[in-house]
Amino acid sequence: MELAFVITAVIVLGGAVAAMSLRNLVHCALCLALTFAGLAAMYLLLQAQFVAFVQLLVYVGAVAVLVVFAILLTRGDDTTHQSVFSKTSFIGISVATLALACILAAALSSYVADRLPPGKPEASVKEIGTQLMTQYVLPLEAVGLLLTAAMIGAVIIAMQERKAK
Amino acid sequence: MDIGTLLSRIFGDPDQAFVTLKHWLVDLAPPAIQPLVSIMLSIAPILGVFPLLFAITTVLERKGLGRIQNRLGPNRVGPYGWLQPVADGLKAIIKEDVVPRAADKVVHFLAPVVIVVPVLLVYAVLPVGRNMVAIDIDAGVLFFFAVGASTELAIFMAGWASRNKYSLLGAMRAIAQMISYEVPLILSAVTVVMMTGSLSTMKIVEAQGTYHGLLPDWHVFTPWGLAGFLMFMVAATAEANRSPFDIPEGESEIIAGYFVEYSGFKFALFFLGEYLGLFAASGLAITLFLGGWHAPAEWLTWVPSYVWFFTKLVLFIAMFIWVRGTLPRVRMDQLMNFAWKFMLPLALVNILAAALWRFLPVGPARWVITSVVILGAYLVLARVVGGEKHFTKREYRFAE
């Protein structure tokens, strides 16, 4: 278990650092996808199967693809054959470090940190499904409605642009 | 346990032969590494059997297509051409590995590797026989779809890193197609999950293990199951970029799509990934709808369970070869219209039909009601999507 944790931690952190510091945006997006996959493995180590697989399905299968397509469709072919690492990366790294420091300081100083860790939750897929369909059915429906509205809106925006041409 | 008792056990119960053999081998190992040996012995057959099936399928497919096209197919290498995959493999290994100068070297190299890994991973949850599944996890079906979704990124890597407009076009087409058909694929599988009340592939197979009269209790022998099965197969064909949905590699338009800049063994890896993905999708269809490793009739249960699984799988492969040899390639707009305007609404109606089936009392009434719901939706959708077209005599403007 320890070794598995070290491997996934290296994948997640390495992917995240590479996603911040590489020059080519597509490389960054691919490294981000690696981080997402590593996080899924991390959830699996924590016995959260459902979260892990949904992370893989949504983030690696959909969000990463969306990101690379957004990069491809909005930017010209401006790949330069200079250094692999971005020269302004230290700004990004320092901003990320500062943000992390702020979050850590807030988290460690809050009363939540003094609480005892809760017992291992029984988060089986069946349990999550039952909860979603009984106690949390209203938020679930609301999120579904919101997403459908957003999707219809996106389609309408795309359609109008096409007619105007 | 000595060899004699092992052999008597294996021949006494051929259904569990491989399970017995595995336990015997694990017991031979020192206790400290027994978990590791057990895992390895679960993985090794997957890595051995399915690529071998791929090799056999390449010959079968070329021979089958040859027969459909009124020619012989490969018949020079070995008896009746059966050693053709060996020759093809050797050729792929010794061929020069050409990488375009402008290509992104690292991503170009990684893409064929990344495409094979997820399709091999999904075999971990396919039960190929009684007690024969690499890992029995609670959310097996979800695992299958989650891991399978990551092949899209590998296709993008291949198409983008090649720095070739045909590659990129092919990758775009492939990803658009895979994302579109993933929705009806998952929705048609959802019906089975609703019925069984479990995402575990083992439990889904077990739920189909009883027999009623002539027919076994397979999900395909219900109205929603039949509709779900057919939709699942169409969507799986599109997911695997197989003909008639092979526009990502439409040779006449974009040469070979996203793997046009690959040669040698990397090209072979793309082929391997594509076929292994096809087998895996067929395996899941068998698991979800065709009773998995269960025999089709009660008096045939003496045949080992894995024989049934692989018989069904080979029948699927034969059907795929037949479809590829028979149907023409669809157009991009037809493909998208079919996914979003026909498959998706029908899959949603099918979920409704499955819910009706679940809550209506057992009897002929629920057969009629669910059939009417599905057939009605099918007819309405077919009329709405296909009703505007007026087929006239085709006029050829350039060929006379």
Image: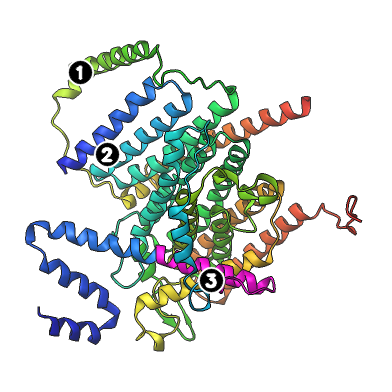
Closer to the eye: label 3 or 2: 3
| Comes first in the chain, label 2 or label 1 | 2
Give the distance between the C-alpha atoms of the residues marked 3 and 2, in whole angstroms.
42 Å
Instruction: Say what amino acid the circle numbered 3 marks.
Output: Leu
Q: Chain of mark 3?
A: B
Comparing labels 1 and 3, the label whose residue is closer to the camera: 3
> What residue lies at 16% left-to-right and 44% top-to-bottom?
A1
Secondary structure under tag 3 reads helix
Real-space Cα distance between discs 2 and 1?
Answer: 25 Å
Dot 1: chain letter:
A
Residue at image mark 2: A42
Q: How is the image coloured?
A: rainbow
Region rendered in magenta: B51-76
Residue A46 vs B26, above or below: the answer is above
In this rendering, the label closer to the viewer, 2 or 1 = 2
Q: Residue furthest left?
A: B31
Do marks 1 and 3 share a chain?
no
Rendered image: mark on residue B60:
3
The label shown at residue A110 is 1
Taking B219 as reference, is A21 above or below it? above
Q: Nearer the viewer, residue A124 or B200?
A: B200
Residue A165, horizontal then vertical, whole percent: 78, 25
